[in-house]
Amino acid sequence: MIDRLVRIAVLSAPLFMVQPLLAKEAPASSPATSEAPAAKEPAAKAPSAGQSAARERQKKCGAEWRALTDAQKSAQGPKWPQFWSSCNKRLKGGDKA
């Protein structure tokens, strides 16, 4: 029994010596870990003015496309990509006609 206590004391002594060093490092590394996800957030930054305008045009054209009936879509001819292209040009003001 005493042999086990001595072994535990010998094996745990280095842990007790290292503990104050780890405790001093813990507060310094804690904010770094809390800031790490914030540092990875640039992908979630706010869109530019051009991107916001394009998104709004896409929403408006999508609403127009959904408002068309199947008969109107087939009579009109183009599929969504062609409709989106012409609608986007029209909303941008690039359609001179």
Image: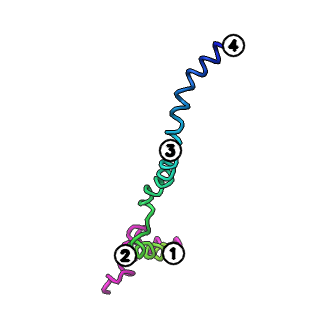
Image quarter in which the N terminus is found: top right
Q: Nearer the viewer, residue 97 or 93?
A: 93
Name the N-terminal-most of marks 2 and 3.
3
Does residue 16 lie above or below 67 as drawn?
Answer: above
- As helix, strand or loop, the secondary structure at mark 4 comes to loop
Distance of mark 2 from mark 1, alpha carbons?
14 Å
Q: Amino acid at mark 3?
A: Lys
Name the residue located 60 percent from the left edge and 22 percent from the top edge: 9
Does residue 31 lie above or below 45 as drawn?
Answer: above
Q: Nearer the viewer, residue 31 or 35?
A: 31
Name the N-terminal-most of marks 2 and 4.
4
Image quadrant where residue 56 sits: bottom left
Q: Amino acid at mark 4?
A: Met
Does the magenta portion include 82?
A: yes
Name the residue located 44 percent from the left edge and 72 percent from the top edge: 55
Residue beneath label 1, please?
Answer: 63
Distance of mark 4 from mark 1, alpha carbons?
80 Å
- The picture places residue 32, in percent across and down from the top left corner, at 47, 51
Say which mark, if any, is on residue 24.
Answer: 3
Residue beneath label 4, please?
Answer: 1
Q: Amino acid at mark 2?
A: Ser
Query: In the picture provided, is 2 more to the left or to the right than 35?
Result: right
The stretch in magenta equals 68-97
Residue beneath label 2, please?
Answer: 86
